[in-house]
Amino acid sequence: MLQKLNYTKRIDLPLDCLNAQIDISSSAFLLNLEWNLASYKFDPDAEIWIEVKSAGSYDYQRYLLGRVASGLGKEIIDITNSRDPITSRLRYKVVQNKQGKRLIVGNLDNFIPRTPVSEADSKSILKIKRDSLLNVPWIVQYTDGEPLLVISGKEDVYSILRDPKSTFEFSILAEVVRQIFIWRAEDRELINEKISEAWKSFFISQGADDDIFDSDILYADPEDRKQNVLDMAIIVSSNFAANHGLNKAIKLLSNSTMDDQ
Amino acid sequence: MKKLEIRKFTSEGSEIFANLIQNKPINIIEEVNKLVISESNTVRLDRDIEINVPKNRYELASSLWSIFGKGGPLFKMRADRDLWNWVSAVYLEPLVIADDRKDINTKIGGVDRWILSNSILYAHRHLISGPFFAFEANYPEEKNAMCQLATPVLMPGELVERISGKRQLASGSVCHLATLLYYDRKTNLLREGITSKSGSPKKFSYYFTQIDRTLDYEGMSAYELLDLLPKNFSKWVELAKLDKKQDK
């Protein structure tokens, strides 16, 4: 209850004011930050801090990013020595000194930076975008012959779904793979050949028959092909889940749910 | 003192260890000792560890620091749960034998104490990695974390549960503040009566939850925070100030 009182007229900042991404280069984990506070009337002398925590541990570091000044800024922080950099969560604070007290006047909590989809697959072929107007948690869109996972920026949906440890991997990715498989198997235009080939190779690596992508194979009944694609989509999605330990994660999830009851 | 090669459990090794802790067979110590050197359930890491019986959590964390701490040979593996599970299995016998309580089941306790949970809600309860991570989170001012490190390894106590269990309290100036309030440097023990209603660790935790979105307390020193605490902490604040006076 008391947490909801706002003694400092603190502004709870929207996700859009901060852009954060973890880049992995030559075994270093670099947190790239870019922020825009220009539309808020913070004191230019107020300090901006970023706190970096790891999900699942009490690893904690904080860094002064500088003064508010014009409200625009960017910084790169090396978080290699965090216990688990890929699961970093951020808290972004604007702090003002008033009468010897460090008051929080701007706050954005539990922000999850964008990361490669998995550590092993840092050159992911799946692009991910946040859309602050999207009314459903996520959808797969196809733009210029390329699939794009769009996640809602409303409320905390983006942060929750991008958490690679808790929700994202085992609740979304297998279904995303299933949907993209159907798109790729049905796509006859192949607008973006490079992307189409990359996805085809990926699906074959996950157990798809390569002739499912061959549009020259004739079926007596077009419905047969449709059913084949749907069946193969489930196989590929299941293999992907198994290969990435998602089934184990689901088992763990269901066990913990039973424990909670 | 026992010296042996460090290993980590395979995931099956961790599962077997968890089952042993869960079911607590009569010969549990014997079974665990067999498991830690089982070639099929462990992976050798080509480093040695010396197993002593630590007096408290601080002594345990200090001894682990040279291996798993910054600059140590296994620093990069310190997030590996199967490794911590193996280390805790190795410590089970000496810790249980050194504890003079009668009931072995009470001494061993729940699975979270020996198997490192992947949930932040329970991970701090791990008897071996818990002290190490409290030490690490406050290094090089690790003495500021005595509120989390002063108790016996098998009996961490309520203060550890309150402070280690909340990320915002477990490191930095708030952790130092809890040490100033509740830890007696003269005896190297926690002060007596800290769980009494007034100014208890529970109230301490509530207070910082209340001001979490108002005050940037992580940016203030423990002594600045001492002056901010409400009146119900006055008994502990006075003791902390007395300690400070005696330092001068």
Image: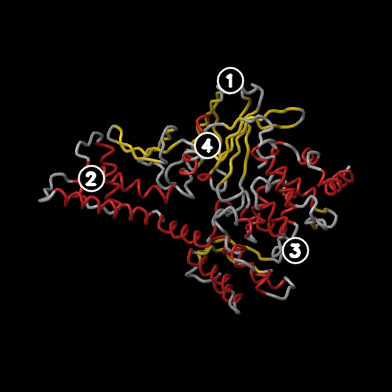
- Examine the rendered structure and indicate whether residue A81 appears above or below residue A244: above
Q: Which residue is mark 4?
A: A31
Q: Which residue is mark 2?
A: A185
How far apart marks 2 and 3 lie (CA) works out to: 65 Å
Q: Secondary structure at mark 1?
A: loop
For marks 4 and 1 on the same chain, the one whose residue lies earlier in the sequence: 4
Residue B17 location (% of width, % of height): 55, 69
Inspect the image, locate mark 3, and give the three-letter code of the amino acid beneath it.
Lys
Inspect the image, locate mark 4, and give the three-letter code of the amino acid beneath it.
Leu
Residue A25 visible in the displayed image = no
Q: Which mark is residue A70?
A: 1
Answer whether labels 4 and 3 touch (C-beta < 8 Å). Answer: no
Q: Nearer the viewer, mark 4 or mark 1?
A: 1
- Examine the rendered structure and indicate whether residue A172 appears above or below residue A99: below
**Residue at the image point whose x is 32% and y is 38% from the top:** A147
Q: Which mark is residue B79?
A: none
Q: Which residue is mark 3?
A: B55
Residue A199 location (% of width, % of height): 29, 43
Q: Secondary structure at mark 3?
A: loop
Residue A208 visible in the displayed image = yes
Q: Chain of mark 1?
A: A
Furthest-front residue in this view: A1
Furthest-bottom residue in this view: B26
Inspect the image, locate mark 1, and give the three-letter code of the amino acid beneath it.
Ser
How far apart marks 1 and 3 lie (CA) works out to: 55 Å
Answer whether labels 1 and 3 touch (C-beta < 8 Å). Answer: no
Instruction: Sort mark 2 into few (<14), some (14-19) or many (20+) by Cα contacts within 10 Å.
Output: many
Instruction: Sort mark 1 into few (<14), some (14-19) or many (20+) by Cα contacts within 10 Å.
Output: some
